[in-house]
Image (cartoon, rainbow, N blue to C red):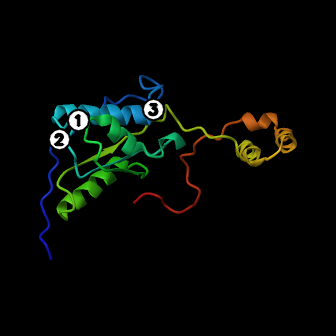
Amino acid sequence: MSQIRRVAIIGGDRIPFMRSNTAYSYASNMEMLSATLQGLVKRFDLGGERLGEVAAGAVMKHSRDFNLAREATLNSGLALETPAYDIQQACGTGLEAAILVANKIALGQIDAGIAAGTDTASDAPIALNENYRRMILDLNRAKTTGQRLKTLLRFRPSFILPSLPQKCRTSHRPVHG
């Protein structure tokens, strides 16, 4: 068995902490993660460097951010070949990312990586009401004008009520250690 390598955190970067619905009210997870990665690349002169990986994520993500870590890495100034992937863990996304990167370094799979996490309650992912979502999907599947009109006639004013993100449990089992 090969020897486990020692792992060290060399440095970090962050944007200033702000309360929800204040300075970052209109900032997305993508904007905040990209800004942080850009700052890290600049601080440690990593422009154009290919790292082993970037592991990052957010607890509450928009569907538009399905590839958050990869897109933010592409915005960062690192080499485009730097692999990146998303993770998501309530209250511990950044820490879990650090553990994943550290484990790969310790096992010799990569030499260096970036671990990150971002989250904003100010830019909460508000989804369509389920009935409205189903109607839109049915509208997309409709083949004729008649089918489209029939589908549109199902619209109700209640469809404009958004489906707000929930930070509650759906089970009665403990979700934290």
Nearest to N terminus: mark 1 or mark 3: 3
Residue 164 is situated, as x and y percent measured from the top left of the image, at 61, 40
Q: Secondary structure at mark 3?
A: loop
Nearer the observer, 2 or 13? 2
Q: Which residue is mark 3?
A: 28
Is 105 positioned to the left or the right of 160 in the image? Answer: left
- Contact flag, marks 2 and 3 (Cβ < 8 Å): no
Is 48 positioned to the left or the right of 66 in the image? Answer: left
In the rendered view, tell whether residue 11 sits above or below residue 1: above
Residue 124 is situated, as x and y percent measured from the top left of the image, at 53, 36
Q: Amino acid at mark 2?
A: Gly
Is 31 positioned to the left or the right of 172 in the image? Answer: left
Q: Secondary structure at mark 2?
A: loop
Nearest to N terminus: mark 1 or mark 2: 2
Nearest to N terminus: mark 2 or mark 3: 2
In the rendered view, tell whether residue 72 sits above or below residue 17: below
Q: Which mark is residue 11?
A: 2
Q: Residues within 10 Å of mark 2 (few under 14, many from 20)?
A: few
Q: Secondary structure at mark 1?
A: helix
Residue 2 is situated, as x and y percent measured from the top left of the image, at 13, 72
Q: Amino acid at mark 1?
A: Leu
Is 112 positioned to the left or the right of 141 in the image? Answer: left
* The image quarter in which residue 139 lies: top right
- Contact flag, marks 1 and 3 (Cβ < 8 Å): no
- Contact flag, marks 1 and 2 (Cβ < 8 Å): yes
Residue 87 is situated, as x and y percent measured from the top left of the image, at 40, 52
| Distance (Cα) linking label 2 and label 3 | 24 Å
Q: Residues within 10 Å of mark 3 (few under 14, many from 20)?
A: many
Q: Which residue is mark 1?
A: 40
Question: Foreground mark, 1 or 2?
Answer: 1
